[in-house]
Every structure is written in C-alpha cells, then in structure tokens.
Amino acid sequence: MKRWLLRITGFLLLAGLVVWALFPEEYVVRGPLLDRMLGRDPAVPTHEVVDLRLQAPPGYEVTLWAEGLGDARFMRFSPGGSLLLAQSRLGQIVHVLGDRDGDGFSDGHRVLVANLDRPHGIDFRGGHLYVGEGSAIARIAIRESGPDSITLAADPERIAEGIPEGGSHWRHSLRFGPDGGLYLTVGSTCNVCEEEDPRRATMLRYEPDGSGETIYATGLRNTVGFDWQPGTSHLYGTDNGRDLLGDDYPACELNRIERGGFYGWPYANANAEGATEPDPDLGEGHEAEIATTVPAAHAFRAHTAPLGIIFVRRPNADPVYRGAALVALHGSWNRSELDGYEIVSLHWDDEGSITERPFLTGFEVDGDVIGRPVDVAEGPDGAFYVSDDYGGAIYRVARAADAPPSGTRPVQRREGLRSRELAARAVRNPLDLIDAGSRQALEARGEALFAENACATCHLEASAAPGVTLKKLEGLALRYSVESLEAFLLTPQPPMPTVDLPADERRALAVHLLANYGE
C-alpha cells in the first residue's frame, strides 16, 4: 500500500511538472475552476448578500428567486407560463414553480423529466417539449391546464440520434427558428484543433420531426446561445474564443449567423475590435479559409465566456431594453484577472452598430465570485430570470414596481427550503427501485471499480495521497438518482477525470456510491 501511495504521489508531482514545463505562461487558472480543483464548494449567496452585491439598472430590483438547483443551465418558459430549467449533469429538467403563496419568491421546484442524457437546450413547439441531449434530440408531449401547471403526456421520444457527443464542449443548445426549423449547436472537442467529424464546431438544422439534418454554419468553436432579432430574420449567436493566448486575446464573439457562413475556428480569431486575424497555431497555410471568415458582429472581452442570449420581445417592456439583447457572461478562468460574471445588454443603432452596457453586475468583485450567469429568460410577467450554475440559483430582475415589496425577503427561507427538499427526497431511496439480487451484484462490482480506479485517493481520508485536497463523499442520495449519478460520472466537474467505463459499470459504481455514501 505504501509503495502504491508513493507511486500516486510521484504521478501527481510529475503531472505538475509537465503542466509547468509545457503550458505557456498565459495558462492561468483562477476563480471557480480553481475552487473545484482544490475541492472547495461554492457558498450559495444569502438574500442579504444578493442585496449588497448584485446591481441592476436604475429602476430595477434583483431578488434571489429560487435556490438549491444544482447545475442550473438553460431555461425556457412554456406556452402556459411554466419555467423549465435544464440540469445537464443531473440528467433532468425541473419545473421551477411560480409564486403561488404571494411572498415574492418561487415556491420551490419539482423534477419534470428525469433520466435524460445530459440535457441542455430546451424549446416548445406543437404541444411538445424538445430537448438537446448529449447525442440526440428528444421530443416529449406535454399538457398544460393553466398557468404554471405543466405535466408530461408521454415518455421522451428520440427523433434524431447520433449527434456528435463528448469532448470539451459537449452540451447542445437548440431552439426553433422563425422558419419552423429546429436549430442545434455542436461545440468543438478541444481548445484548438482540426476536427474529424465535420459536424463539430457547427450549427445544425433539422425539420421539426428530426429529419433532414444539414450543416447550417461552420467555424463556430462553442456557440452556446442564439436567438433571432425581432423584426428581422437575423440570427445572432454567442461564441467562446479559444484559450492560452493571453489575458486579452482573442475576443469572444457575437456572430450574425447565416446559412453557409464560416466563422473562423480553428484558423482565425477575432481581435478586440472584432476584426479577423490568423490563429497563431493553425492559421498558417489556411489563408483561403481565413479570407472567407465572416467577421464578428460584436467583440466581447476575451475569456468572458458569453453563453445565453435573448432579445427582449414584450411590447410593454421598458423602451430602453425593448429590442435589445441580454447576454450572460459566464466568466473567465484562463485569465490573471477575472472578467465577465455579469449580464450585459446589447443595443443596435439605426446603422446596425452595437453598444454593450452592463445590466446585472456584482457576481464577481475583486476576485470573489458568488455566481456564474448561464442563461436569461424573459418571463410572461415582464421580469428577467437569470440562471447560475455556480450557486445553483435563479435570480429575478424586475422593474421596481413589479419587484417584491421591501422587507418581504424571508431571511430564514433557505433553511425552510432545505427542510422541504430533504423531506421530499426521504420519501424514496434512489436504490429502492432496484431488486435486491441485482442491487447486491451491482454493489459488489461497484466496490471493485471504486478500488480499481483509485477513487479513495481523492475521496477518503484514510487513503488520500499526500497533498491531495479531499472531495468528501456524503449526502449523495440527496442530490442524485442512480441515473443522474451515472450521467455525472460521464461528464464530471473538473478536475475529476471522466470515468472511462462502459454504461453497465458506471451504473455499478453509481449504485456502490449511493449505497455507501448516500446519507
């Protein structure tokens, strides 16, 4: 055992030396990613912290609308007014309840669809919910009997399969366009490389039934959010620029995406003004492709990681923002000074020039991060809802006349929500649905896999290698089902490596973990 631990320690030291020797000096890890590498969990901000830190434009107020949401990614309001949230790593979509008791906050949430494969983008059409999964598009019939009353009418149906999966950018966003087509983005597998599958780093288009897959646009490294500008046919998408070229290069991009357009990656990047420049690693020899690159419509600051984007559509919206776009800047990791971590608004003038303004700030102050905005949704109430996958929360930004009255924030609400969640989870053990014989075999195999993959060295104090910050295993049954834990093992948070196991062995490992570390 001692010899084995020395080998692990040696490997960690060697890995550190390799990183130091091979990565350029521009390789900087700061903020939330560093926290995860060191095993530090984020602290969900309290209502008081939100009041002190988050700043909206004059005349607007911010509230912590919902919490305890884990991997809170993309959102969409249903035709009947229900707010749905995709939790990619948990493999589910939750219904975030409205404010039925009148206290100015969400009444909690419930799982609407479970056992999905890394869901991300969601949209509605013709009585169905459409979901962009890890390698497929799912369509699910829904029922709505009134506001905030969505239920499922059928099991998920995969209408398109074989979509490229995995890699560095594995989430798929989707939504329906004004032409009735279903649009879906596929990110790159890497920071910068030439892809083998021509569908990587693209936007794809499908018919509503999942047929007719075509490549709509290429050269899009990681376009996560996209929307159509009201009153035009213009499609705009956010794109994350590559890393490891310094604090301020290249810019992240807003692109006006057109059919057949090429947007540069991996041969070209945008500079701070949005102009196209050859990539220093892969640009040489690809002058022809670079010459055809469509320049960015707008340049965001480097490494700010723009994700969700929506155009403000409501006719009675604030005139300052009606027709503008709101963009979630998830925030930098490969930068010596953190940047992003905010919502910005984009405003078009009569000549088509775009001006960027701050809209919701304060998630990061002097290196202290309390949230990472992912998506923005415009509610039927006229408020804007912002998801945060760092604090596992949703924030509501509303004009002051529509915001909860001052002094109504329930200071003890966090404990109440936690108690209700624990009570709801206690109703059914996630292992109860597995018959005793199968469960015993799965636990035994999972225990062996836990040992074979040296999981204890990072999770159990008695087996930890020197210098390793433990990521303790506890309370897993409060956060995961067997299926959602399987999904997490397939796409874990860094620095935990992907568990390279077939599906049946991932299931066995998940059962072992829930059986031994569920409480």
Image: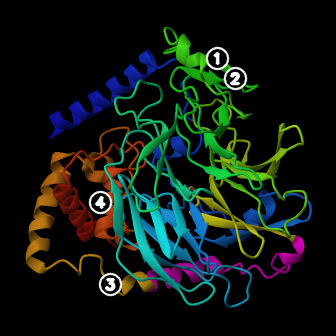
Q: Secondary structure at mark 2?
A: loop
Horizontally, residue 203 falls left or right of residue 226, namely: left
Residue type for callout 4: Glu
Q: Nearer the viewer, residue 250 or 198?
A: 198
Residue at the spot of label 2: 271
Residue type for callout 3: Arg
Pointers 2 and 1 in contact (C-beta within 8 Å):
yes
**Could you tell me how far apart the alpha carbons at marks 2 and 4 are, in whole angstroms?**
40 Å
The magenta stretch is: 400-423
Q: Quadrant of residue 28?
A: top right
Residue at the spot of label 4: 486
**Could you tell me how far apart the alpha carbons at marks 2 and 1 are, in whole angstroms?**
7 Å
- Going 44% across and 86% down the picture, which residue do you hit? 423
Q: Nearer the viewer, residue 93 or 451?
A: 93
Residue 496: in magenta span: no
Image quadrant holding the N terminus, namely: top left
Q: Nearer the viewer, residue 516 or 63?
A: 63
Residue at the spot of label 3: 428
Pinpoint residue 175: horizontal percent, then vertical percent.
Answer: 55, 57
Residue at the spot of label 1: 277
Neighbor class of circle 2 (other Cα within 10 Å; few <14, some 14-19, many 20+) is: many
Q: Secondary structure at mark 4?
A: helix
